[in-house]
Amino acid sequence: MARIETFQKIKDLKERDKNEHMKAYRRSVESFEQVATELYETLKEKEQAEDNFYLSLEQKKVPAVSFIQHQQYIQRLDEKAEFLQPRVQTARTTMESSQAKLTDAHVEMKKFQKLIERRIEKDEQGVKEAEAKHMDELSMNQFLNYKNR
């Protein structure tokens, strides 16, 4: 079977791979947060504009020009939101994909870590068995030497 150092090198490679996936995941989260925040701000701005317009309608008469400008402003915000929604979904998909890759890389690294731990335990067990066998042989030799006197 391969030596522990070999497994350690493979584990180190897997750990580097995991760290790269972690960086990619963080970038994808930041990208998602940026686009989602932009969509949120757009929707919030639209809601506030509508509330302000309805409030002004209740308080006084609104000129037709102002009404048309408001409708165009709301329409632009709707178009911006419609433009941002697919970008948010794409960013979410990318983020979820990056998370899955990170999870897989983490699992792979843990597999090698467990393999190394088991190999160390097996080696230690072998050393203990060899020591016990050696002690048995020494005891037997002492017993035989004592009996032969």
Image (cartoon, helix red, strand yellow):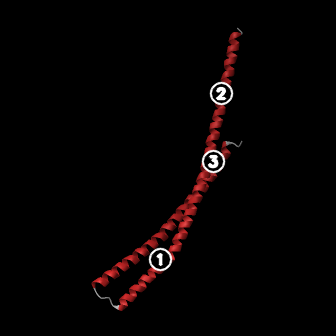
Q: Is residue 148 above or below residue 135?
A: above
Q: Residue furthest bottom?
A: 64
Q: Which residue position holds label 3?
A: 112
Q: Which residue is mark 2?
A: 131
Residue drawn at x 51%, y 64% as measured from the top left: 29
- Residue 27, how many percent across, how many down? 53, 64
Q: x, y percentage for residue 94? A: 56, 66
Looking at the rendered structure, the kind of residue marked 1 is Ala
Q: CA distance from mark 1 to mark 2?
A: 73 Å
Name the image quarter holding the C terminus. top right
Q: Which residue is drawn at the image coordinates 58% and 63% (left, top)?
A: 97
Counting from the top left corner in percent of width and height, residue 127 is at 65, 32
Badge 3 amino acid: Phe
Query: Which quarter of the figure is the N terminus placed in?
Result: top right
Between disc 1 and disc 3, whose residue precedes? 1
Q: What is the distance, in whole Å, between disc 1 and disc 3 at their CAs? A: 46 Å
Which of the two labelled residues, at mark 1 and mark 2, occupies the earlier sequence position? 1
Front of the two marks 1 and 2: 1
Residue 20 visible, this angle: no
Q: As drawn, which residue projects farthest toward the front?
A: 58
Viewer-proximal residue among 4 and 114? 114
Q: Secondary structure at mark 1?
A: helix
Q: Which mark is residue 81?
A: 1
17 above or below 63? above
Q: Are marks 1 and 2 in contact (CB under 8 Å)?
A: no
Q: Is residue 84 left or right of residue 45?
A: right
Mark 2 vs mark 3: give the one in front.
3
